[in-house]
Image (tube, rainbow, N blue to C red):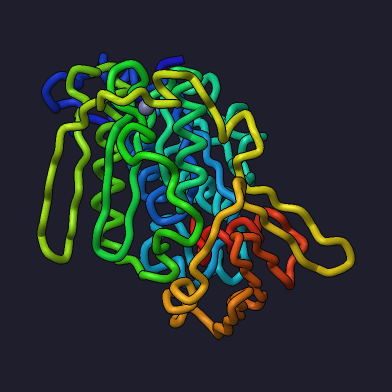
Amino acid sequence: MAVSLERYSRQMLLPGWGQEGQQRLRLKTVVVVGCGALGSHIASHLVRAGVGRLILADRDFVELHNLPRQALYSEADAEAGVPKAVAAARRLRQLNAQVKIEEHVVDVNADTVEELIVGSDLVLDGADNFEVRYLVNEACVKHGIPWVYGGVLGTYGLMAPIVPGETPCLRCLLGPMPLPGAVPTCETAGVLGTVVAAIAALEATEGLKILMERRDEVLHSLIMVDVWKGDFERVQTLKGTASCPVCDEGQYALLESDLGSRAVVLCGRMAVQITPRPAQRLDLALLAERLGDAGLVRANEYLLRLDVEGVQLTVFADGRTIVKGTDDTAQARALFARYVGS
Ligand SMILES: [Zn+2]
């Protein structure tokens, strides 16, 4: 059945787009990993642009403090604690009923990532932590699926398209995965809504090029933006001389082994234990300093305790963390990513 393309008339006027480009877009499937700030903006762009099918994955639910930058949600969603994937899908269907939208309330991890992305044409990064990004990188390289990396912190953001076989992968670009606690997160360093919009727009644009099969126009660059300072920088992404364990050697450590963090419910304690693998040495004093504004923090030489969002996180020096006040492993993983990082 013919679908009206009338709504796309303005973008179809763009050079090289036309009805043909629009029809091509309609045949494509995109996965958005994470429906927070970046993910909700990215999904909105793709749905408005007229992608064929959109798969949304997110483990979290809407909260009031999301609203300054998470484009698809309302106060009512926060009040009701609606899962982000569900609230996003609902809103996106109102924006463009021609797009097939599938929502998955799921923790993206080694057990779930391949099922989610295999068969898709593109994966877009709306994740809030490096463990998921490095996992997505492995899965995309393994299955030859292009993806676009994006990240924001404070007023600063990064974006790079990753096309297996054509560009360096995330592991090539950023080196080994940062250790838990080693990098600040948006929950400890803050984030400005406008940088989210900027990076999401760049991710979606590269995504559209890939979907429309205009591969020669895809940037082989890492873009860095500081919206507050007005700094925009683009550096060419070149493959180094060193062999990459992921895209050269096909070692998918996070995907295939126990390297990813483990979450287990501690029976009868209303608590979940997260165990990063391999074990790490955390600088608890540094972490305590970083978390100072996030909630009530107490630390000694063995552990750090943070009371926040109605739960208590106990972080040990090896990275092991007990989240007390929940028996939901996805929520505990989300809290761990938010406050301890990765
Ligand atoms: Zn690589």
Vertical order, 333 against 9 (above or below): below
Residue at 62 percent of width and 69 percent of height = 315
* In-image side of 284 versus 81 (left or right): left
- Compare residues 322 and 213 and report the one nearer the observer: 322
Examine the image and state in which quarter residue 265 appears.
bottom right
Residue at 59 percent of width and 81 percent of height = 300
Q: Is residue 99 visible?
A: no
Q: Is residue 152 visible?
A: yes
Residue 174 % position (x, y): 33, 41
Task: Find the residue positioned furthest to the right.
Answer: 268
Residue 88 % position (x, y): 50, 50
| Picture quadrant of ligand 1 | top left
- Compare residues 20 and 172 and report the one nearer the observer: 172
Vertical order, 301 against 116 (above or below): below
- Compare residues 287 and 14 and report the one nearer the observer: 287
Report the number of numbered marks: 0
* In-image side of 228 versus 251 (left or right): left
Vertical order, 340 against 330 (above or below): below
Residue 217 % position (x, y): 17, 22
Examine the image and state in which quarter residue 237 appears.
top left
Residue at 59 percent of width and 27 percent of height = 114
Residue at 33 percent of width and 17 percent of height = 23
Vertical order, 178 against 269 (above or below): above
Residue 284 % position (x, y): 52, 72
